Image (cartoon, grey):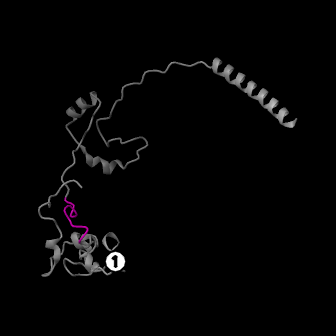
Amino acid sequence: MAVMADSDTDRTNRIELREVMQSTRNDTVVHPIPAAQALQYPTGGVVPFGMPAPLNPEIIQGAVHHQPLVVMQANATVGRPWQIQRFAATQNVLVGYRKGTWCVSCGHRKLSHIKEESFGYKCKRDYCARCGWLKDHHQQSNFLMGPYCTNPAKFDSPHTQWYDMERRQVGVI
């Protein structure tokens, strides 16, 4: 009995809710959506990347190729006030580096790292394979060793074997 009473009450509540929603929907006036105005890009100052700016505009500014004001104003009339610079060749030292054989952190061979010692980006060695100096003596390379080392190479340095010479080209990573 209680189950039937609940279902009758639920049914009437659902019918009332449906009627209220239909009357509300029918009474709502839909206004026409106005046409969007054409964007006006500023031609001077820092390039506005997003609002709010999710990127740091001072850093992203370097990606924009600056043109004379006349060219930028002409480009703004067609909707593209700035030209983005193309990808340029990078001077990254890891292009062509044999990462599977040589450690990217210290420059030593993978086989010379003992089993308990970390290899690659997790390497904990504190001396460089290129110059043989401790990590503390690598201030000019931001305390990076191995392929990043700018010190003179020692006589038995393996740095000549780090790269694939046939594939050694500087490019986009």
Q: Residue at x 32, y 35 (%)?
A: 42
Q: Give the range drawn in magenta.
A: 91-101
Task: Give whichever of 39, 27 is nearer the camera.
Answer: 27
Left or right of 112? Residue 14 is right
Q: Residue at x 62, y 20 (%)?
A: 28
Q: Which residue is drawn at 85% across and 32% down?
A: 5
Disc 1 residue crowd, few under 14, some 14–19, many 20+, Cα 10 Å: few
Report if residue 11 lies within the magenta region: no
List x then y, in percent, for residue 32.
51, 18
Tell me the residue that label 1 is attached to.
124
Report if residue 96 lies within the magenta region: yes
Left or right of 89? Residue 116 is right
Q: Which image quarter: residue 120?
A: bottom left
List x then y, in percent, for residue 93.
21, 64
Compared to residue 110, the image places residue 64 above or below, namely: above
Left or right of 57? Residue 88 is left
Tell me the quadrant of the picture where the C terminus can be found: bottom left
The three-letter code of the residue at mark 1 reads Lys
Task: Give whichever of 4, 62 is nearer the camera.
Answer: 4
Q: Residue at x 36, y 29 (%)?
A: 39
List x then y, in percent, for residue 83.
24, 39
Dominant SS type (magenta): loop
For label 1, the SS is loop
